[in-house]
């Protein structure tokens, strides 16, 4: 999924905030839109070099 490219209408945003306040929320978790591959990419070379540690543990346990 790609992030939306259009900006949210200020009135619509205010309505969302008001619904959160009515629901009793006092804070919101907001993150930047990072692609998932940014986090997966460093794991790929490590897995290729070191292998899957879970598989190694299971093999050593005889499972």
Image (cartoon, helix red, strand yellow):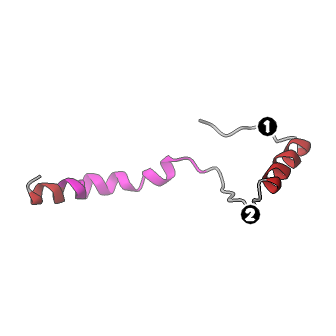
Residue 60 in picture, x, y percent from top left: 10, 60
Q: CA distance from mark 1 to mark 2?
A: 24 Å
The residue tagged 2 is 27
The N terminus, quarter of image: top right
In the image as oriented, which residue stretches furthest toward the left? 62
Give the residue at x 90% y 45%.
10
Residue 57 included in the magenta stretch of the image:
no
Give the residue at x 72% y 59%.
28
For mark 1, give the secondary structure. loop
For mark 2, give the secondary structure. loop
In the image shown, does 3 or 16 lie closer to the viewer? 16
In the image shown, does 20 or 38 lie closer to the viewer? 20
Majority secondary structure in the magenta region:
helix
Q: Which residues are magenta?
A: 34-55
In the image shown, does 28 or 18 lie closer to the viewer? 18
The residue tagged 1 is 6
Residue 52 lies left or right of residue 38; in this view the side is left
How many callouts does the rendering have?
Answer: 2
Give the residue at x 74% y 63%.
27
Q: Nearer the viewer, mark 1 or mark 2?
A: 2
Residue 1 lies left or right of residue 11; in this view the side is left
How dense is the environment of label 1, judged by Cα within 10 Å: few (below 14), some, or many (20 and up)? few
In the image shown, does 60 or 22 lie closer to the viewer? 22
Residue 61 in picture, x, y percent from top left: 11, 59
Q: Earlier in the sequence, mark 1 or mark 2?
A: 1
Residue 54 included in the magenta stretch of the image:
yes
């Amino acid at each position: 999924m790609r992030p939306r490219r259009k900006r949210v209408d200020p009135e619509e945003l205010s309505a969302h905030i008001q619904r959160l306040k009515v629901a009793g929320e006092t804070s919101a978790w907001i993150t930047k839109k990072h692609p998932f591959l940014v986090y997966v990419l460093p794991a790929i070379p490590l897995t290729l070099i070191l292998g899957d540690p879970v598989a190694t543990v299971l093999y050593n346990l005889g499972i």
